[in-house]
Image (cartoon, rainbow, N blue to C red):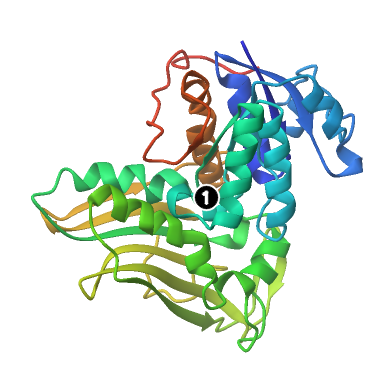
Amino acid sequence: MVSTIVWGTGNVGRAAIRAVEAHPALKLTAVLVHDPGKVGRDAGDLGGLGCDLGVAATDDIDAVLATGPRAVVYAASGDIRPDEALADIIRAIRAGAVVVTPAMYALYDQRNAPPELREPVLAAIADGGGSLFVSGVDPGWGNDVLPLLISGLGTVVDVIRCQEIFDYSTYDQPDSVRYLVGMGQPMDYEPPMIAPTVPTMVWGGQVRLMARALGVELDEIRETLDRRPLDSTVSTTTMGEFEAGTQGAVRFEVQGIVEGEPRIVIEHVTRIHPSCAPDWPTPPDGDGAHRVIIEGRPRIEVTVEATDEGGSRAAGGNATAVGRLVSAIDWLLDAEPGLYDALDVPLRPAVGKLGRRQP
């Protein structure tokens, strides 16, 4: 059994605890937390399993890494603390662990990552013998391996479009929804997540990754942005009221331009209520979906709806993103120490999981 720790127990970390516990080759040996209120709580409780796993959460990073875990699922946020997240990841790699994470956007396409990020990671790999694989939480497979797989079914491919379409009214992340994305803020508020160049910083690596797999050269990466106000005040189940006239929906694209045309597109359509921007793309039902559209001959459209934690599509998206990462651990352990991306790491089948039940 592979000694594995989960670092962070937010939306992604909860799913990571469940994924590690369910994996027949992995053994959850520690859970690292930042919140003092979580120290001492059992991993099963933090992961929403409804039972104890016999692993108490701790904030003692040195003690956990000193045990020599073979794998680390780094689930702490890197959105607003990228330097701290990188330092944490490097510590784990130097301890000899295989690390999988969605936290470092710039390393999605690790070959073209900035030297100031790539070189410290490579140095840590050389020193400690660990590895790193970064994949997105929105989810990564929806912006790399899935569209690339489907593209191979076409005779002619004109455009590859990856969509995340979500209603955030049931998403229990008020700081991210209100301040990073800007829902409920005045229309003159500039949300950090969609400020100029930020979408490219976050999703540009996945566009470049797909271009590399498809063997095409990008002229450039462009961004588009559209925002809509709420026509009336709405109330949500988890985050309270959002007033009329404030931002109620946002739509943006990160476009890979090939020979002057947008050919590889990652698009996000996000609402705080279904009544806002009804003319924009909508999920088939429920609060969200991920969709890949191949414009060409034939035209191919695949929609994925995942649910978890009582039917939440946002939680389902997190769970599938984590599943991709956790399932890669055994492959990474068999590979040479290194820095890997989604084109290196195959999508792993559910070996040993069919019919397996968690406590």
At x 41% / y 43%, what residue is drawn?
141
Q: In the image, is residue 100 above or below residue 237?
A: above
Horizontal side, residue 163 vs residue 259: left or right: right
Horizontal side, residue 275 vs residue 190: left or right: left
Q: In the image, is residue 80 above or below residue 38?
A: below
At x 87% / y 32%, what residue is drawn?
60
Q: Which residue position holds label 1?
A: 107
Residue 148: where, in percent of width, then height? 28, 46
Tell me the quarter of the picture where residue 190 sits.
Answer: bottom right
Q: Which kind of residue does numbered mark 1 sit on?
A: Leu
At x 44% / y 49%, what residue is drawn?
111
Horizontal side, residue 332 vs residue 358: left or right: left
Residue 307: where, in percent of width, then height? 51, 41
Horizontal side, residue 340 vs residue 117: left or right: left
Can residue 48 be spotted in the picture? no
Residue 40: where, in percent of width, then height? 90, 29
Quadrant location, the N terminus: top right
Can residue 290 be spotted in the picture? yes
